[in-house]
């Protein structure tokens, strides 16, 4: 069975945001379904669409898995539920945890439940900056540009800065 490199965006803006993300990463890491996990730094980011909410902490992780895209979606939704995410949350609203599949190997798909590569990744600095930190030369399937090239073309002007620096200020 062939494994695939998967990249995920993880964000939180309710409760102990840092702990929520750390617990999500830990759950991904200890799962027998995943291995070889790399994590970017945590970034403090302003909300993009619904401005009337707390700032987010975001990161991107890369890992290898034998799970197929829909199996992996079920896996991360189990982790989100374990960490207190409500099933029917409105789009762009505050959340304890949000895990999005950015890329799943070379898969290209578009269904009601799952679109890979994630359609928003090319327009979101809060995704591209941490993604660039761990996989700068990774070429996004279907788009045929590297993460670094996408970051250079990204028109998003929202605030994204290292979270650790924020704590020391």
Image (cartoon, helix red, strand yellow):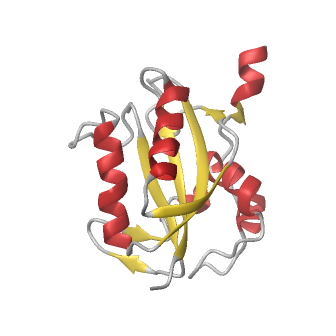
Q: How many marks?
A: 0
Q: Which residue is drawn at 39% across and 69% down?
A: 115
Q: Quadrant of residue 106?
A: bottom right
**Extreme bottom residue here?**
1
- Above or below, 141 against 21 in this view is below
Q: In which quarter of the image is residue 134?
A: bottom right
In this rendered view, identify the residue nearer to me: 92 or 71.
Answer: 71
Q: Where is residue 61 in the image (x, y as percent from the top left)?
A: 59, 53
Q: Which residue is drawn at 28% across and 41% down?
A: 81
The reply, left or right, for residue 50 in relation to residue 145 is: left
Q: Position of residue 149 (x, y in %)?
A: 76, 67
Quadrant of the rendering where the N terminus is positioned: bottom left
Q: Which residue is drawn at 56% across and 59% down?
A: 121
**Extreme top residue here?**
169
The reply, left or right, for residue 126 in relation to residue 25 is: right
Q: Where is residue 102 in the image (x, y as percent from the top left)?
A: 51, 62
- Above or below, 169 against 135 in this view is above
Q: Residue at x 71, y 50 (%)?
A: 129
In this rendered view, identify the residue nearer to me: 91 or 18.
Answer: 18
């Amino acid at each position: 069975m062939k494994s695939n490199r998967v990249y995920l965006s993880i964000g939180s803006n309710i409760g102990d945001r840092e702990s929520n993300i750390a617990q999500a990463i830990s759950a991904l890491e200890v799962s027998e379904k995943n291995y070889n996990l790399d994590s970017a730094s945590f970034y403090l980011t302003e909300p993009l669409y619904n401005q009337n909410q707390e700032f987010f902490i975001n990161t991107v992780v890369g890992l290898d898995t034998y799970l197929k895209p829909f199996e992996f979606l079920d896996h991360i939704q189990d982790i989100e539920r374990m960490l207190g995410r409500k099933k029917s949350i409105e789009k762009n609203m505050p959340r304890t945890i949000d895990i999005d599949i950015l890329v799943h190997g070379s898969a290209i798909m578009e269904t009601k439940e799952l679109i890979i590569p994630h359609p928003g990744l090319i327009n979101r600095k809060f995704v591209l900056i941490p993604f660039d930190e761990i996989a700068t030369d990774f070429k996004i399937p279907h788009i045929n540009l590297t993460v670094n090239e996408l970051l250079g073309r990204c028109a998003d002007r929202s605030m994204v800065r290292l979270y650790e620096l924020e704590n020391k200020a």
